[in-house]
Amino acid sequence: MSELRLGKRPATHDPRDLQYAHLRDETVKIRVPAHFGHYRAVQQWQMLGNGPDDSVAPGFGGAGDCVFAGGDHETMLWTAEGGNPATFTGKQAIADYSAVAGYVLNDPNTDQGTNVRDALNYRRQTGLIDANGHRHQLGAYVALEPGNYDQLMEACYLFSAVGIGIEFPSSAMGQFDAGKPWTVVAGAQVEGGHYVPVMGRTSATYIEVVTWARVQKMSRAFYEKYCDEAWALLSPELLSGGKSPEGFSLAQLQADLANL
């Protein structure tokens, strides 16, 4: 049986959330390539406490900190793209999980997962802590329509990563353990919530996400069926020389987010 953990609490919605669809100017045409993503800029992904991880404590078996492990993975990508790669270990991810969700190390009664919006507010106001004690803050976040594939791909292309929540089906852990893509399996039951960063796509069929220390393929149909929240994330740290890997300036990125 896999020791990997889930840990995203059910999606909540707030009428004050900025909505990507409301900001999207349909006169602006952005051509998203069939194959894109910069996730290879990170040489080694870590477990970050979301499964067995001795960097938290010797023999640590894992906790439901996927929302923070995913946030650290996103930050690893952005800082690598920006030319100032940050390092994280499970110790920092668990510290942030504890700060937001009240987790106490090795106390399973406190391992209750995280509301993603709470984590995003924390990331914008306080920032995720890296191995050197530096905080990494989000510039902004905007809600996508859950399961809307076109919005997902456009936002991921513009901002390098989109954080998504999925209702995790019983079939998906076995697929992950076997090194197979996440695809829809008839009759699979939802076992809990999980947070993963979307970081690109290899074709019209498969999306690339990062979770549990590796890149994982997800089918479009799986995303459309199981996504219950998705967030476009703007990090100033993905910029190098004032521009993103796709050539957008910071001013242009902010204008895209505000005026799309």
Image (cartoon, helix red, strand yellow):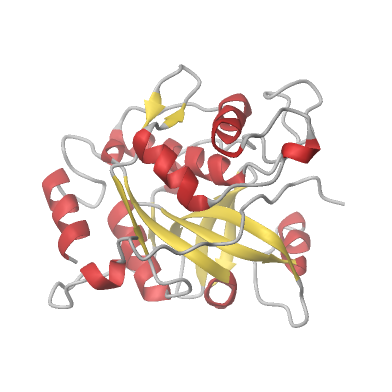
Q: Which residue occupies 87% across, 52% down?
A: 1
Question: Which residue occupies the foreground of this view, 94 or 100?
Answer: 100
* Residue 196 shown left or right of residue 113 in the figure: left
Residue 204 visible from this viewpoint: yes
Considering every residue shown, the one lying at the far top of the view is: 132
Residue 181 visible from this viewpoint: no
Percent x, y of residue 156: 36, 59
Percent x, y of residue 96: 54, 31
Considering every residue shown, the one lying at the far front of the view is: 15
* Residue 145 shown left or right of residue 68 in the figure: left
Considering every residue shown, the one lying at the far right of the view is: 1
Q: Which residue occupies 57% across, 40% down?
A: 69
* Residue 93 shown left or right of residue 108 in the figure: left
User: Which quadrant holds the C terminus?
Assistant: bottom left
Q: Which residue occupies 47% across, 26% down?
A: 129
Percent x, y of residue 86: 42, 27
In this rendering, is residue 56 above or below 239?
A: above
Percent x, y of residue 247: 18, 50
* Total labels drawn: 0
Considering every residue shown, the one lying at the far bottom of the view is: 186
Question: Which residue occupies the foreground of this view, 118 or 152?
Answer: 118
Question: Which residue occupies the foreground of this view, 234 or 203?
Answer: 234
